[in-house]
Amino acid sequence: MAKENQEIVNGWVVWGKHVLEELIELKEQNKELDRNVNKIHTEIAVLKVKSGIWGLLGGLIPVTITLVIIFITGLL
C-alpha cells in the first residue's frame, strides 16, 4: 500500500499513461511517414524512367536529322 501511494504521490502513474499514449501516437505517425516516404520513392522512380525516355527521344531527334541530311546529300 505504501508503494502504491508513493507512485501516486510521485505522479508516475499519471505520467506513465501519458507517456504510453504519446508513444502509441508517435508509432502511428512513424508508420504514416514510412508510407509517405515509400510513395515518394515510387514517384521518383517513375520520374527517372520518364526523364530517361524523354532524354532518349531528345537525343534521337538531332541524330535522325543528321542522318537524313547525310542520306539526302549523298555523303555516304
Image (tube, rainbow, N blue to C red):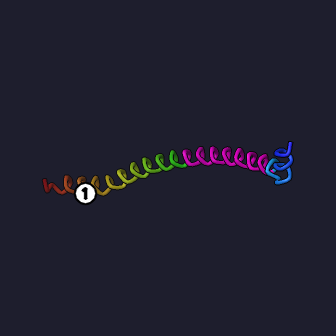
Q: Is residue 53 left or right of residue 39?
A: left
Q: Is residue 68 left or right of residue 17?
A: left
Farthest front residue in view: 2
**Total numbered labels:** 1
Q: Quadrant of the N terminus?
A: top right
- Residue 39: x percent and y percent? 56, 45
Q: Tag 1's secondary structure?
A: helix
Q: Is residue 32 left or right of residue 58?
A: right
The main secondary structure of the magenta stretch is helix
Packing grade of label 1 (10 A; few <14, some 14-19, many >=20) is: few
* Between 74 and 35, the one nearer to me in the picture: 35
Farthest top residue in view: 1
Q: Is residue 17 left or right of residue 62?
A: right
**At 72% across and 46% down in the image, what residue appears?**
25
**At 19% across and 56% down in the image, what residue appears?**
70
**At 81% across and 49% down in the image, what residue appears?**
7
- Residue 35: x percent and y percent? 59, 44
Per the rendered image, the range of residues in magenta is 15-39
Farthest left residue in view: 76
Residue at which label 1 appears = 66
Name the amino acid, label 1: Thr
Residue 67 versus residue 24 in the image, above or below: below
* Between 53 and 71, the one nearer to me in the picture: 53
Q: Is residue 13 magenta?
A: no
**At 77% across and 48% down in the image, what residue appears?**
16
- Residue 19: x percent and y percent? 74, 50
* Between 20 and 7, the one nearer to me in the picture: 7
